[in-house]
Image (spheres, rainbow, N blue to C red):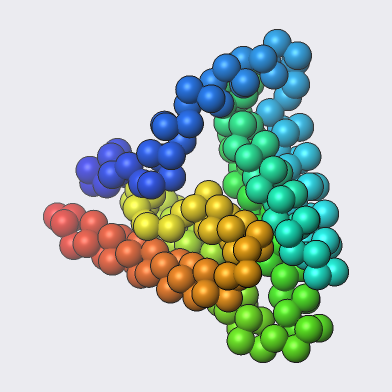
Amino acid sequence: MTDDTVRATPTLDDRLRSAAGGITGPIALALARLNIHPNALTIVGFALNAVAGLIAASGRLVGAGVLMLFASAMDGFDGALARASGKQSRFGAFLDSSLDRLSEGAVLLGLLWWAITEGRPLTAELLGLFLLGSVMVSYTRARAEGVGYACKVGLLTRPVRVALLGLGMLTPWLRPILMVVVVLTWFTVVQRMVHVYGASQREP
């Protein structure tokens, strides 16, 4: 086992979660007192993102963006609620990660449908690269951890991607924001591959 299996440099995602702790903590405690299960928040967050995807497919991007950001913010409380209520579980972590991928995919597929039907081929291609890149960011971490390497490194993790996508949907700058996100997402994939390669070379 290498040091990489024990330690990992905090990512931007980690720093954002730490900074938001003063807000999420009290709300999570209030939800725990109401006996709300963290898995329920996870499932509701996914359902709302799926609806946001349908709204995006119809071309109502602002409404879809608002709902996606709300759903993603609500889904961000499930981990804090699990800790506050003492209901942490390996299944809960698995469910959260799985539905996070599906939530992101649902919104991107809705946008992809809209771009195709509106005759926007460049936007459609960017959305396809975004979707594949987001899957690869998650896969590289999961596969690395499967063979024994911590791999939380990377510039653009899911919360940041979602925030940028929401900004694009709420403004006229969707295409340029997609260009930036696609480049940074694939840069993150490369970062993780390089990180794992470096960790493997430090082994005896």
Residue 55 sits in which quadrant? bottom right
Q: Position of residue 124 (x, y in %)?
A: 66, 81
For residue 137, side relative to residue 52 (left or right): left
Residue 105 visible (yes or no) = no
Q: Residue at x 42, y 32 (%)?
A: 19
Q: Position of residue 186 (x, y in %)?
A: 43, 71
Q: Residue at x 33, y 64 (%)?
A: 191
Q: Quadrant of the C terminus?
A: bottom left
| Residue furthest top in the image | 33
Residue 33 visible (yes or no) = yes
Residue 75, above or below 47: above
Q: Position of residue 84 (x, y in %)?
A: 58, 17
| Residue furthest front in the image | 172
Q: Position of residue 35 (x, y in %)?
A: 75, 15
For residue 195, side relative to residue 88 (left or right): left
Residue nearer the viewer, 172 or 111: 172
For residue 50, side relative to residue 15 (left or right): right
Residue 74, above or below 149: above
Q: Quadrant of the N terminus?
A: top left
Q: Residue at x 41, y 31 (%)?
A: 18
Residue nearer the viewer, 102 or 183: 183
Q: Residue at x 54, y 21 (%)?
A: 25
Residue 108 sits in which quadrant? bottom right
